[in-house]
Amino acid sequence: MNIAFIGLGNMGAPMALNLAAAGHNVTGYDTATIPAGLTAASSAAAAVAGADVAITMLPNGDILRRVAAEIIPALPAHAVFCDCSTVDVDSARTVAALAEARGIAALDAPVSGGTAGAAAGRLTFMVGGPASAFATAEPLFAIMGAKAVHCGPSGAGQSAKICNNMILGVTMIATCEAFALADRLGLDRQKLFDVASTSSGQSWSLTSYCPAPGIGPASPADNGYRPGFAAELMLKDLLLAQQAATASHAETPMGALAAELYRQFVEEEGGKGMDFSAMLPRFTKRHIG
Ligand code: NAD
């Protein structure tokens, strides 16, 4: 396939290189650097001319809207436009409608798995948009990822992503609080892990990404809380969830509190650039009363 790949940062570059390594003809564009191994285009519009599938992996919804306005008129009529960025549901639906008005099928296909998953081709794709476009993109998801779930119409992929990450943010905070409380109670952290990892307090945050150093499988806590998944990216996703909750009149009090705690951590407490599990040292440092 002829693939255009726009946004070649920490995630986009390894994803595009995996597609090229699998034998696809990948033309790349980024306002910063374009990695060797891809055909470099001089603009986003030039990258998509002749593309069967155009993939974007961009920082946010505003940039996605700008890039979409530039590439949609330049895409061939048969092409599929597949955005893999994490953006607000409204931006995902708006760019899909813009594409569909020109007869071009669009997918919102955000990912989980982080930079390690992108490099290893082990991402999970959660996808919104028409089934026929999903079928076209599925072989590419199989190269870049280990799993792709067709979640529903346009916006369903972003909806799944922010709901999942809201659960993640809330359970990570709860897990960190519990370890900090255990410390104050004189309860050994390993003992709490041994109990909760096979009891009803179990979660991915505890057993796959334990925020306490030296406990459970290796995680960013064992690496000085270097990300991993940065606290500011968690904040971005929690704010997207709050934006969607407000727009859809959903009540998400735990999500709102998690967003506020990550906002304080990132903006006021030096958490920017640290892994999102560094909420544990944040709680252990604080005393109430
Ligand atoms: P990044 O900042 O490393 O990459 C974004 C790239 O987009 C940069 O190279 C930038 O130069 C480029 N760019 C910006 N404006 C552009 C424009 N107008 N035209 C072309 N290129 C442009 O970010 P990332 O970590 O690769 O994340 C990309 C997306 O993936 C984000 O939406 C993020 O939330 C999501 N995501 C990231 C992770 C992660 O662990 N890093 C995990 C899952 C999802």
Image (cartoon, rainbow, N blue to C red):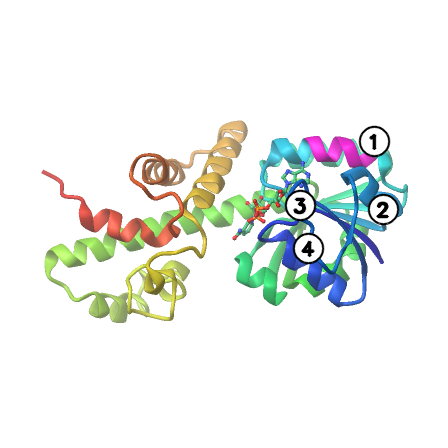
Q: Quadrant of residue 94?
A: top right
Dot 3 or dot 4: first in sequence order is 3
Residue 135 visible in the snapshot: yes
Residue 142 visible in the snapshot: no
The answer to whether the residues at label 1 and label 3 have Cβ atoms under 8 Å apart is no
Tag 3 residue: 7
Dot 2 or dot 1: first in sequence order is 2
Judge left or right: residue 256 versus residue 111: left
Three-letter residue code for mark 4: Pro
Q: Secondary structure at mark 3?
A: loop
Q: Is mark 3 within 8 Å of ligand 1?
A: yes
Check the image and report above or below for 60 versus 120.
above
The magenta-colored residue range is 66-72
Q: Magenta stretch mostly in which secondary structure? A: helix
Q: Secondary structure at mark 2?
A: loop
213 in magenta: no
For mark 1, does the 10 Å Cα neighbourhood hold few (<14), some (14 to 19), or many (20 or more) residues?
A: few
Tag 2 residue: 79
For mark 4, does the 10 Å Cα neighbourhood hold few (<14), some (14 to 19), or many (20 or more) residues?
A: some
Q: Secondary structure at mark 4?
A: loop
Q: State the image coordinates of residue 263 (x, y, percent, origin top left).
A: 37, 36
Dot 4 or dot 1: first in sequence order is 4
Dot 3 or dot 2: first in sequence order is 3
The answer to whether the residues at label 2 and label 4 have Cβ atoms under 8 Å apart is no
Q: Secondary structure at mark 1?
A: helix
Tag 1 residue: 101
Tag 4 residue: 35
Check the image and report above or below for 240 versus 141.
above
Three-letter residue code for mark 2: Ala
